[in-house]
Image (cartoon, coloured by chain):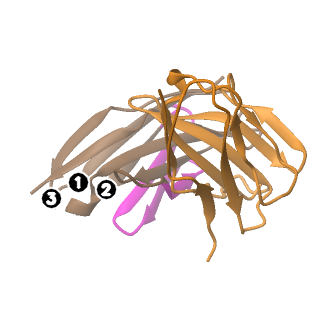
Amino acid sequence: GQSLEQPSEVTAVEGAIVQINCTYQTSGFYGLSWYQQHDGGAPTFLSYNALDGLEETGRFSSFLSRSDSYGYLLLQELQMKDSASYFCAVVDAGNMLTFGGGTRLMVKP
Amino acid sequence: EAQVTQNPRYLITVTGKKLTVTCSQNMNHEYMSWYRQDPGLGLRQIYYSMNVEVTDKGDVPEGYKVSRKEKRNFPLILESPSPNQTSLYFCASRSGTAYNSPLHFGNGTRLTVT
């Protein structure tokens, strides 16, 4: 089976940088995805890492270390609109996704 | 517009009264799935389907049924709803072939069972 751990809540100020960590235990790991969900909304895809290293998409970056079973989402130049929940999800050999419990990010002025 | 459409958005029902939540996607995706979301528990998979006429149990299938008679539709059926099925439900779809293909979610159905 799969299990993922991420912090339940993170608080940061506008303009700062925040890192949301995700550790996982899985059989047949293929990749790590990140999703964003605003209150009352549907989750939306942010990124996918299959190989070790950092993937950058604008203000958001995602990192993966397969040997450490660890990844993180890095949000730079935080804006109020980044206040949301962020979920990591493992993609396994069967192309299935298993989600972590989510990290609620609160951005303060 | 590429989208996943689920209905209804809100549903209040009583214990034991059968209900169906519909889900339809217009992206010709092979893979479709149902999740329930409860506070602190993230998104837990109920059932998924890799293609027409192929369905499999996810992590929390008890009390639910699904069917996949057509590629675009994947309804979720609660034959005899109970209060512990009160939750926020999401339908999602993705291309079944690429590991990096993103899940596209519907807008959710908030179900209350009294």
Q: Identify the subunit bearing mark 3.
A: A
Q: Identify the subunit bearing mark 2.
A: A
Residue extending farthest to the bottom is B1
Mark closer to the observer (3, 2): 3
Task: State which quarter of the image contains the N terminus of chain A.
Answer: top right
Whether residue A56 appears in magenta in the rendering, the answer is yes
Which chain is the one coloured brown?
A
Magenta-highlighted residues: A44-70
Can residue B25 be seen by looking at this rendering?
yes
Which chain is the one coloured orange?
B
Residue at the spot 68% in from the left edge and 33% down from the top edge: B18
Query: What residue did someone put label 1 on?
Result: A17
| Residue A14: assigned label | 3
Secondary structure, magenta segment, majority class = strand
Q: Count of labels shown?
A: 3
- For this rendering, which residue is in front, B30 or B37? B37
